[in-house]
Image (cartoon, rainbow, N blue to C red):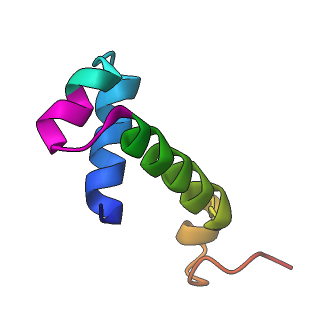
């Protein structure tokens, strides 16, 4: 499952979809879906997040002084 599919599945579950139904629609088992959701959480926690102030400052998202 690629990152885009993982993100979409995670959003659907967050919005209230039943995980077993999401798994069936993707053609994977429930355990595979949960493993992929764990990967998604890990991917999201590993990515740096930059606030709007960094983007507005025009410094490419680099932390300020």
Query: Up-down: is 56 above or below 14?
Result: below
Q: Quick one: 1 or 40, which is closer to the camera?
A: 1
Q: Residue at x 36, y 33 (%)?
A: 30
Using the rendered image of the protein, determine whether residue 31 is visible from the camera's viewpoint. yes
Q: Quadrant of the C terminus?
A: bottom right
Quarter of image, res 13: top left
Q: Is residue 9 magenta?
A: no
Predominant secondary structure in magenta?
helix
Q: Which residues are magenta?
A: 22-30
Rendering coords of residue 39 (x, y %): 53, 56
Q: Quick one: 28 or 5, which is closer to the camera?
A: 28
Rendering coords of residue 62 (x, y %): 68, 81
Q: Residue at x 66, y 65 (%)?
A: 46
Q: Using residue 27 as the reference point, say whether residue 39 is left or right of it.
A: right
Q: Using residue 19 as the reference point, say whether residue 21 is left or right of it.
A: left
Q: Residue furthest right?
A: 65
Quarter of image, res 27: top left
Query: Up-down: is 24 above or below 43?
Result: above
Q: Residue at x 37, y 41 (%)?
A: 33
Quarter of image, res 63: bottom right
Q: Residue at x 28, y 19 (%)?
A: 17
Rendering coords of residue 37 (x, y %): 47, 44
Rendering coords of residue 1 (x, y %): 30, 61
Using the rendered image of the protein, determine whether residue 52 is visible from the camera's viewpoint. no
Q: Is residue 24 magenta?
A: yes
Q: Using residue 52 as the reference point, say whether residue 33 is left or right of it.
A: left
Numbered marks: total: 0
Q: Using residue 44 as the reference point, say whether residue 26 is left or right of it.
A: left
Q: Quick one: 33 or 65, which is closer to the camera?
A: 33
């Amino acid at each position: 499952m690629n990152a885009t599919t993982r993100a979409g599945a995670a959003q659907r579950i967050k919005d209230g979809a039943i995980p077993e139904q999401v798994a069936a629609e993707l053609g994977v088992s429930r355990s595979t879906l949960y493993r992929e959701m764990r990967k998604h959480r890990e991917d999201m926690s590993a990515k740096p997040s930059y606030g709007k102030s960094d983007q507005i400052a025009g410094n490419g998202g680099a932390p300020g002084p």
